[in-house]
Image (cartoon, helix red, strand yellow):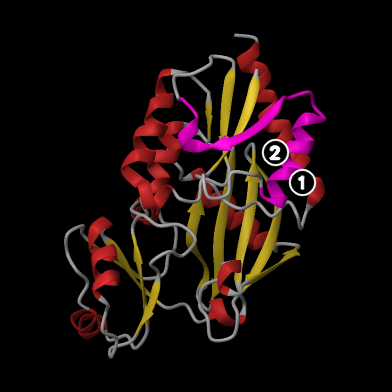
Amino acid sequence: MNLVLATHRESPGLTPSDALLARALESRGAPVTSAPWDSIEPAGAPDQCVCLRSTWDYHLRAPEFRAWVSGFRAGPDRLWNPPDTVLWNLDKDYLRGLERQGIPLPITHWLPAGEAPDPGALFRATGWRLAVLKPRVSASAHGTILVTPETALSGEDAARLSRSGALWQEFIPEIRTRGEISLMFFGGEFSHAVCKQVAPGEFRVQPHLGGEARRIDAAPELRAFGARVLRAVPARWVYARVDVVHAERGPVLMELELVEPELFFHLAPERADHLAECLAGLVGQNSRR
């Protein structure tokens, strides 16, 4: 049974973090290759399993990516995370479902697809002075903007936010002072954590925007919060990243990443073994079928 780590065409090779995962898998006897996701045939070789890793263009090709993921439903346990889990997590509307189960989020207003956001009207309705607008289908903070009552959206921003629908969220100031904590879980267990700090003047934590990450020992309260979030997920998962900000009122969930999250093995090399063990076990189960 061969395991393919799925990437994307602009960066078909493995990230430094995923290269550590590949080595950990190979040390367990699991043959590993990498390939852009759209070069992998869902109904292809029955001895091939796929793990989504750096499929970082999926939000730009969302209908095609959804169809590709759905193609794996015909073969049990050939895609990880599983197809239904990935499809549930692609649209940030999943956050609304988690909120209904009591998971605290930033205060969020949901704008339907086809409706261009009107910042002036939204600020009048909320009384806020600062807010975040983000598309419901997005990755790596693509299309996420910080707005004030004076902000005039560009035509491109308005079209992007209207196309998939949008989230209008209160700005959590602790993102700039405390940073965002990413909690990694594999096979149902907590693995490791990092703190991502924004660059001066920024509010987004991604490295291409100047953000920096460092490994931390997550407080028990945050680890328990991450486990609580994952108990509310309505589908199976193998790997998960829970992104949290410890706001004044307590932890709030910013994102739950179940599709293709960076897992920061370059900051915690030994933890690649944890996920490799989970994946190698799944590969072994498929080989015995």
Residue 76 is marked as: none
Do the residues bearing badges 2 and 1 touch, measured as CB atoms within 8 Å? yes
Q: What stretch is highlighted in magenta?
A: 15-41
- Residue at (73, 44) in percent of width and height: 19
- Residue at (64, 56) in percent of width and height: 223
Q: Is residue 30 on the magenta stretch?
A: yes
**Can residue 78 be seen in the rendering of this structure?**
yes
- The answer to whether 11 is drawn above or below residue 131 in the figure is above
Q: What element carries label 1?
A: helix
Residue 272, quarter of the rendered image: top right
Residue 132: percent from left, percent from top:
38, 75
**Can residue 110 be seen in the rendering of this structure?**
no
- Residue at (59, 8) in percent of width and height: 289
Horizontally, residue 153 falls left or right of residue 139, namely left
Residue 159, quarter of the rendered image: bottom left
Along the viewing direction, whichever of 113 and 43 lies nearer the viewer: 43
- Graded by Cα atoms within 10 Å as few (under 14), some (14 to 19) or many (20 or more), the crowding at tag 1 reads many
- The answer to whether 250 is drawn above or below residue 272 in the figure is below
Along the viewing direction, whichever of 94 and 56 lies nearer the viewer: 56
- The answer to whether 15 is drawn above or below residue 115 in the figure is above
Q: Is residue 192 on the magenta stretch?
A: no
What residue is disc 1 on? 271
Dot 2 amino acid type: Leu
Residue 227: percent from left, percent from top:
58, 49
Horizontally, residue 271 falls left or right of residue 103, namely right
- Which quadrant: the N terminus? top right
What residue is disc 2 on? 275
- Graded by Cα atoms within 10 Å as few (under 14), some (14 to 19) or many (20 or more), the crowding at tag 2 reads many
